[in-house]
Amino acid sequence: MGHTNGINGANGVQEIAQRARQGSRSLPFLTDLLGNSLNDRLLFAVPKKGRLHQACLDLLHGSDIQFHRHSRLDIALVKNLPLALVFLPAADIPTFVGEGRVDLGITGRDQVAEHECVTPPTATTGVDEVLDLGFGKCSLQVQVPAKGDLTKPEDLIGKNVVTSFTNLTEQYYRRLEAEQAGNTDGKTNGDAKLKTVIKYVGGSVEAACALGVADGIVDLVESGETMRAAGLKAISTVISSSAILIKSKHPSDPKLVELITARIKGVITAQKYVLCTYNIERSKLDTARKITPGRRAPTVNALEEDGWVAVQAMVLRKDIAIAMDKLTEIGASDLIVTKIENSRTGD
């Protein structure tokens, strides 16, 4: 089982709550709404809508972060921890966390990169990435009409490009223009006039080419279905992204941040793995171990029947069918696969 610097069980949570009550801070932009009820709470920003929203809610539920969100409020007080959830646009979360107004946040790596283009992190400002959450995987890609003559991102230099990620797109095309001008090291002159015209659109970016607003776009691609339906094709990737947990450089309660991180990590691990249990002849145990090595090592217990052992091991969910096939081939019996609701793996 994992540990979080001495915070264990109910006593640890009580210790966090006591410290939080002693460490009040002034948050005028939120306390106007809820009085002083936020002053003693760590603030955790989550996307209020969009592609990451429901997955974040599921993650919070799995981490036993109990709250009720009133329909007209973007703030929810957590019932069982000194914590408040703040529901914000995903694009704004890096700003709030980076300025220390919010302690923790979940957003896309693309949003953090977009923010850091104009507000580079320093020793005291900006965000620290805590954990890749494994969902919301996508790529920010340069896209052009599938039936057109444009085949590489350099073909859009000097043309109109529409995007919701103007900072990353400008950075990308500054580098391309610098390379085209002979700067092979990729260094750019931020003061130089950009030949490529970058236009901002807040939504439905994929329609820009069909409407004659753009020659190409830079937009997020998940499955690619929307891109293909709009008659577009990807010709380059600006950045790959997924949902990440981020924290402030100076969180108000580092111990609580560690506890929440451990809970979230436990849920993510549980989603990736299943528990495989089976019986096997001891003479075949070494072969079985190679099939189900577990995260550290399998658990092996002797059975009453001489020469047989029971084995338990965590197996990646995506590999379990093949593992069961191989175990059956070497004579394993009584194979059972159990869903893991939560975990603490100690790493």
Image (spheres, rainbow, N blue to C red):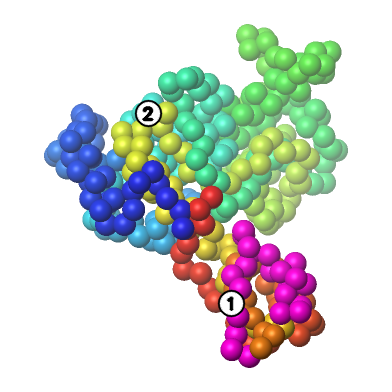
Furthest toward the bottom, the residue is 305
Residue lying at 50% horizontally and 23% vertically, measured from the top left? 121
C-alpha span from label 1 to label 2: 46 Å
Q: Tag 1: residue type?
A: Asn
Vertical position of residue 295 compared to residue 227: above or below: below
Q: Earlier in the sequence, mark 1 or mark 2?
A: 2
Q: Which mark is residue 250?
A: 2
Element on which disc 1 rests: strand
| Residue 285 colored in magenta in the image | yes
Residue lying at 42% horizontally and 54% vertically, measured from the top left? 263
**Residue 40 place in picture, x, y as percent:** 20, 39
**Residue 45 place in picture, x, y as percent:** 38, 42
Asked which quadrant contains residue 296, the reply is bottom right
**Residue 209 place in picture, x, y as percent:** 68, 40
Q: Tag 2: residue type?
A: His
Residue on which disc 1 sits: 301
Q: Which mark is residue 237?
A: none
Q: Residue 176 versus residue 276: which sits nearer the camera?
A: 276
Crowd rating for badge 2 (residues with CA inside 10 Å; few <14, some 14–19, many 20+): some
Would residue 269 be seen by someone viewing this image from the given angle? yes
| Residue 188 colored in magenta in the image | no
In magenta, the rendered stretch is 282-305
Asked which quadrant contains residue 279, the reply is bottom right
**Residue 193 place in picture, x, y as percent:** 66, 12
